[in-house]
Amino acid sequence: MRYLESGSTDPYYNLALEQVVFDGPGQDTACCMLWQNDNTIVVGKHQNTLQEVNMAYVREHNVRVARRLSGGGAVYHDLGNVNFTFIAPHEGGGMDFSAFCRPVAAALAELGVTAEVSGRNDMTIDGKKFSGNSQYVKRGRVMHHGTILYDSDLSVVGQALRVPEDKFTSKGLSSVRSRVTNVRPYVKEDLPTGQFLVRLRQALMNAYDMEPLVLTEEQLDEAQRLRDTLYSTWDWNFGASPPCQIVKKRRVEGCGQLELHMDVEQGRLNTLHIYGDFFSLDEPEELARLLLGCPLEEGALRERLSGVDPGRYCRGMDLDALCCALLQ
């Protein structure tokens, strides 16, 4: 396994750097990357940014908003947070989050922290979340990235993010802050964030016998180009809000938050946009295109999607759940 550490705290550059490593040579070689972003909200690829972010707050406090390649929900990064990325060959099948979370949990155990992998994609301490994880799979490669809230300003999390009420209800929780924690209070030594990052890096390097990954000038130039032309642009991070007649929101068990924006003409789906904090193996836009022109009726929907697995586009969702979301 190779190791790369970004010296930048620019979220747009760091996301571009991830993509350059993911798309670059050495496709059969695994890589680990540690990085930090300063004062940033990172939304999942399939999320409606304007619905997820408290725009008044982020403008007032100069919080940057970035969109990543992978699905999942929005997270807040500051310099009290450490991000980790694993890029590795993907042998097919579904998404295995625990395989990439376990090494981080083992590294934390060396610092006296008992961490558990829980839920769809979280790591917790005493039932409180300190790490959210996401994955992107393409052409036989997987990119897994996660956060470690080490010494973050948790007050910002609840103010900068807009969390749907039914997400609270489904978890039996009354606030964002009640279900998240920093790692630092659980560490047996009093380590500032910088020292924690060094210890985490050393534990991972010892576990995997890593060698440094040195990028070429061409790769670094490509990361800067992607940063300037994609990841820092309004079109990528916000995009135009699609015109629609109907908006349906629901939480689908095992899948996550689902938001459907539809135009219906003469009882048929004219446009369909699928948002949410779900994960996907294939692009949900492909599923939406399959349904264009279909009558908004259960039998027609099932016939149109005969032989199609909705779970490839929205992990954890079956045809029954999709029909229910579209029709109810």
Image: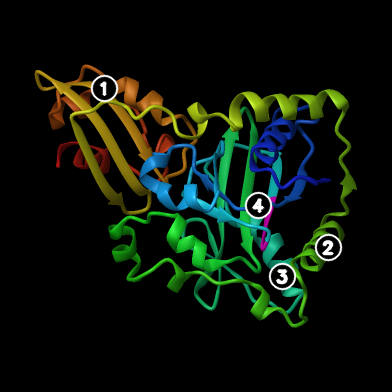
Q: Of all residues shown, which one is farthest toward the bottom?
A: 188
Which residue is under mark 2? Answer: 198
The earlier-in-sequence mark between 1 and 3 is: 3
The stretch of residues the image draws in magenta is 80-84
Q: Which amino acid does the dot numbered 3 rest on?
A: Leu
Q: Residues within 10 Å of mark 2 (few under 14, many from 20)?
A: few
| Above or below, 152 relative to 142 | below
Q: CB atoms at circles 4 and 2 under 8 Å apart?
A: no
Cα–Cα span, label 4 and label 3: 23 Å
The residue pinned by badge 3 equals 108
Of the two numbered discs 4 and 1 on the same chain, state the one appearing first in sequence: 4
Secondary structure of residue under mark 3: helix
Mark 3 against mark 2, which lies toward the viewer?
A: 2
SS at badge 2: helix
Q: Which residue lies under the disc numbered 4? A: 38
Question: In the rendered view, would you say 249 is above or below 141?
Answer: below
Mark 1 closeness class: few <14, some 14–19, many ≥20 residues within 10 Å: some
**Foreground: disc 4 or disc 3:** 4
Hey, what amino acid is under mark 1?
Answer: Thr
The residue positioned 76% from the left and 80% from the top of the image is 190
Q: Position of residue 328 (x, y in %)?
A: 14, 42
Where residue 60 sits: x, y (%)? 48, 51
Label 1 to label 3: alpha-carbon separation: 47 Å
> As drawn, is 207 to the left or to the right of 20?
right
Q: Secondary structure at mark 4?
A: loop
Q: Is residue 128 left or right of residue 184?
A: left
Name the quadrant containing residue 136. Answer: top right
Cβ atoms under marks 1 and 3 closer than 8 Å = no
